[in-house]
Amino acid sequence: MAGKSTAFASLALVCCLPLAAATLEDALTDLARRIRTAVRGEVISLEVRPAADPDRDRVAAQLARALGRLQAPGDGITAVTVTLSKNLESRLIVAEVGPDGRAVFIHPFGGGLRDAGAAEGPVLLEPRLLYRSPGPIFAAVEAAGGVVLLRPGIIEYRRGDESGPEPPRTEFVPVRPLPRDPRGVVTIESGWVRAWLDSVRCSGTLDPWTVRCAQGDSLWNLAPGVEARLVEGRNFFLHPAGQIFNVVRMAGRPGAGMELVAAHTDGSIRRHGEGGEEAVLARDAGTEIGLVRTCPGSEELLLSSDGGALQAYRVGSRALIPVGRPARVAGMVVAVQGGLAIVRDPSAGYSVYRIEARCDR
């Protein structure tokens, strides 16, 4: 079990985040130079995704010309995967070298979601660092002055940083190799801890620590009363609402009861009512969503991220309404659960932040 954990903890991440390039061509020229340096003459394959992105063919053609010697994926070929996305500040090109992501380059270019006009408001998002680790963190939840972490091969209860005493922990071995971007969930209710990772389920009490893990492919609890099944080997779920990355349950419009808001694999965020009605609220607003409450007695806001910033939204009947300015963190937001965000930073490893919303009245 220890060997399995070490394999994941040894991932080397190199991330370069230059100032926003003036044009897509400038970003691609610099990106190709960095990729060539990372592969050091190795023969490479190139995949640019998603296929539906309007810039996909243009990006693939320019990188192919700049990189040269491209081959089909296979043994002995170094895979380079380029993903096009958008965060609140700019469009993003994210390049990963090798199946283990030994080098990751993030390049901004052009305009982001804020160019559409984020509404100013009295809400200020403030990330508060809870925990930092040199190795990957898949999921986290706050608990009794500490944080329960789901990590490669381990679930543990931390009340300090890595230099503190050995925490209560339970080790496990996944049945199958984890996907490239593993998704995990940890919940705690009335002192009972539950956790899900691809092919692994954990449960037990927090204090005293009795958490045990076993192999299994049961439904995941993504939100109160909301279950879904992870697609084997992938990082999204099958749910009656469709294929989703994440979902939250929140108070709906007056008279509508509780509603689900889900981040779908097609890039949309949609509202799903209890009566089966559905509305597309936004496109390209983020694949990671959570909830944040602004002030005592105030409304819940949707928290969303697609990259290096987080934005709060009011959920309208047909649209997400940005509230205040985005909160920036050092690195890339890789997961949001509840009001916590997990951030990957090449210089500091993985960090868990509590996202607090301050009301300036």
Image (tube, rainbow, N blue to C red):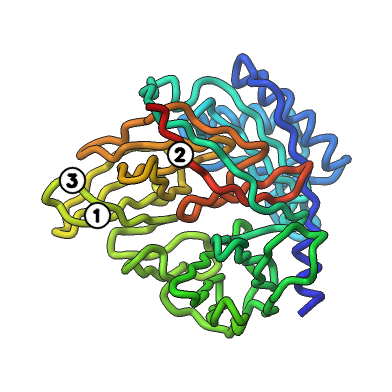
Question: Residue at label 2?
Answer: 357
In this picture, residue 135 sits left or right of residue 183? right
Question: Residue at label 3?
Answer: 253
Residue 326 drawn above or below residue 240 = above
- How many C-alpha atoms fall within 10 Å of the one at disc 3: few (<14), some, or many (≥20)? few
The residue positioned 22% from the left and 57% from the top of the image is 258
Using the image as rendered, state which of residue 31 and residue 280 is in the foreground.
280
The residue positioned 49% from the left and 25% from the top of the image is 112
Q: Are marks 1 and 3 in contact (CB under 8 Å)?
A: yes
Measured as percent of width and height from the top left, residue 354 is found at 55, 48
Amino acid type of the residue tagged 2 in the rendering: Ala
Question: Residue at label 1?
Answer: 259
Circle nearer the N terminus (1, 2): 1
Disc 3, SS? loop
Measured as percent of width and height from the top left, residue 160 is found at 72, 59
Residue 62 drawn above or below residue 352 = above
Q: Which mark lies nearer to you, 1 or 2? A: 2
Disc 1, SS? strand
